Image: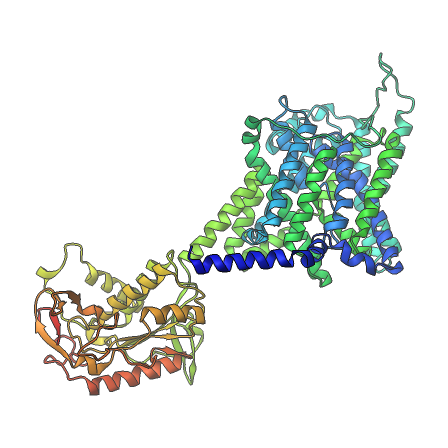
Amino acid sequence: MSDRELKEFGRSIFSWVKAFPSNTPRYIAERLPIIKWLPKYNRTWALRDIIAGVTVGLIVVPQGMSYAKIAGLPVQHGLYSAYIGAIFYCFMGTSKDLTIGPTAVISLITGELVTELSGRMTAQEVAAISCLCVGALTFILGVLRLGIILDFFPTTVLVGYTSGAAATIVIQQIPKWLGIPNINNREAVYSIIINMFKAIKTLKWLDLVIGLLGFFLLIGIGLAVDRWGRGRFSIQLIKISRFFIVTVLATLASYLINKDAPLDAKGAIIPRISILKTVPSGLPHPLVPSITADIFSEIVPKLFAIALATILEHIAIAKAFARKNRYAVDTNQELLALGAANVTASFFGAYTVTGSFSRSAVKFQCGVRSPFAGFITGALVLLALFFLTPAFFYIPDAALSAVIMVAVSVLISPPSVFIQYYKVNLWDFLSSQVALWVTIFVSVETGIAAGVGFSLLVLLYRIARPNFRLLRQIKDRPDVFVDDYVGSTFDTVPSPHGVLVFRIEESTTFPNSDAFKSWVLDEVYKHTRFGGRPKDTREKLWSDDLDVHIRNLRKIAHGANSNVSDDNLPKLRAIVFDFSAVNNIDSTGLQGLFDLRDLLKDYAGTTDYPTTFFEVHFVGIQANVLRILELSGITRPVDPIALQKIEVLHEVDNEVKHDGGARVTASDIGSAALSINGVSPFLKEEGLVHLTIRDAIDSALIRSENWEKSVPQQNDNNTGSDSDSNSGHKDKTEIHYV
């Protein structure tokens, strides 16, 4: 580090320390958004927040218990997660609509982890350690402001794995919903279905009736309200609260059925239908999660899957409701809030929490005005934990399964969504299907990894093989150019003889440099002829099959029965590159551009006839790309006056010798600023960069005409003219600078 850099670093540190006292309150306010909105709180907000908070509380109590069962945990742990997440987010969140707590997808992945570690750790220990690790990772991402990494996870993958996870949950709940006992719902989906049919004769009829009644009552309430309650908020509340209503009714029916049930030898009830039984009241003592290094290293992949699903679900929901309500959410602050909530929750018996789409939608429908509604929801859950746990004893398992199935069914995207993906983009459709089916038949974390991995491969392929276009002018519209391959829908005219216009629709970087070069050369071979001397067979390399390649290309382009020869095609005079879609160019891309230009110059004939005209023009270059091209010298044209200083000799190796013995090939003319008797071979004006394609073509034609007038013609009359292509010398050209 230089002295200057050290001084600048020292000044920046001093400025930061000096500004620290004044910036501290602002920083705290940014990390705790409640400081900004609480002073503006009013009665109107309070009324709407109370309605939203209570309504969501009535939903999250049965949902929290149901999701805990999906996670393989006692039902009270779902309530612990519900109150901590809702209250904590109130202080640090930036979305008024979002509510965080237990969700179906996270519960499913947590349940897979609990099953994997059963026998070595209790379910509560697994849930706590996963909650702590996910929270810590999320918080670190927020501190480092790495929310940008979420841009690499497409919506199609999110829709696919969410639908797959929801479908998996529904299938897992069917045995309990139908009252079929002794089915391990932690097995693969196909195993659950097979075992369920094998055990169909053992189903419990009372459980079946409770499950079916609960399910159809939930569906019926929703359909009835949608049909007759539109625009009436009081009736909409019935639909919103239907999970609570059905749970209460099912619990009441269960109590009436089981109140006279016999007792076992220990005095415990032998229920006639499957019920939750004892649910501890109050809150657990805080405990520090602990885990051995061996187990931790074993579960790291699944922890990353939980973290990824947690973050994606949360941010996607926050952004969706922010767009709907036209306010902004801070992605990095959301990561901090989510991370802090999970770290705190891990000490109080909770498992991983994230944003819930269904409950957030309810808050939105209730007209929530601020994050304070989450505090009310958390308080209601706490009241349930302290005073309602005796009533939880009789909640039927079949009814909870019905609640789960209906609740998660909204996460299953209908076929129309995937059909739309197919119509818009095949790759989007395929990525959603990969995530969907791998999630269903393998696991959620594998589904996420497969979907994201597939999408990244598609992204890399699109970068490596972008769309290249050969453009033609629309007839009677000299300033409008379209793709040659879709030009059949337009009345187009070809470009002037020997001038080809190309567009690249991606940045020119190392993955696509070779593909770009090969494609341009192939198009040049199709539409123009070789401008140099024909090579003798003895001079060709053993691997040189360019003539065959060109013939095949022309047959494809002009028809298999066509006999297109060099006599029917113009010489290459200029290439115009439309770089309006090129946002960046790296070193490999720049080198590829130089290599391409040199190959095109050879094909145009400048190697054999150094005074032959050929130029590469550029259109629509963005400022950052133009700076790189200007520094490289590729945008500077060759001065024809300088070429009059060239003495043409006939040698075999086609190389250039300086007085000092250095050797430079003829293709280097124009690629480096060589001085000839103190005269630069480059014009001072930047004549190869243009605003429009028409300007570039006109410039190339004018410069070609001026070139032919300025440069003496070769003996073989081969420079600048399309009429005499095959005359000339057999041997290569050596150029001496004098």
Q: Is residue 353 visible?
A: no
Q: Residue at x 85, y 47 (%)?
A: 54
Query: In the displayed structure, does residue 560 sit left or right of residue 176?
Result: left
- Give the image location of residue 489, x and y in percent: 45, 74
- Number of marks in the rendered image: 0
> Residue 365's quadrant in the figure?
bottom right
> Residue 565's quadrant in the figure?
bottom left
- Give the image location of residue 347, x and y in percent: 72, 34
Q: Is residue 81 above or below residue 332?
A: above
Q: Is residue 656 visible?
A: yes
> Residue 281's quadrant in the figure?
top right
Along the line of sight, which residue is nearer the eye, 98 or 272?
98
Q: Residue at x 62, y 22 (%)?
A: 120
Quarter of the image with the N terminus in it: bottom left
Query: In the displayed structure, does residue 265 sit left or right of residue 670?
Result: right
Q: Residue at x 78, y 26 (%)?
A: 204
Q: Is residue 136 above or below residue 579?
A: above
- Give the image location of residue 112, x and y in percent: 62, 32
Quarter of the image with the C terminus in it: bottom left
Q: Is residue 134 above or below residue 180?
A: below
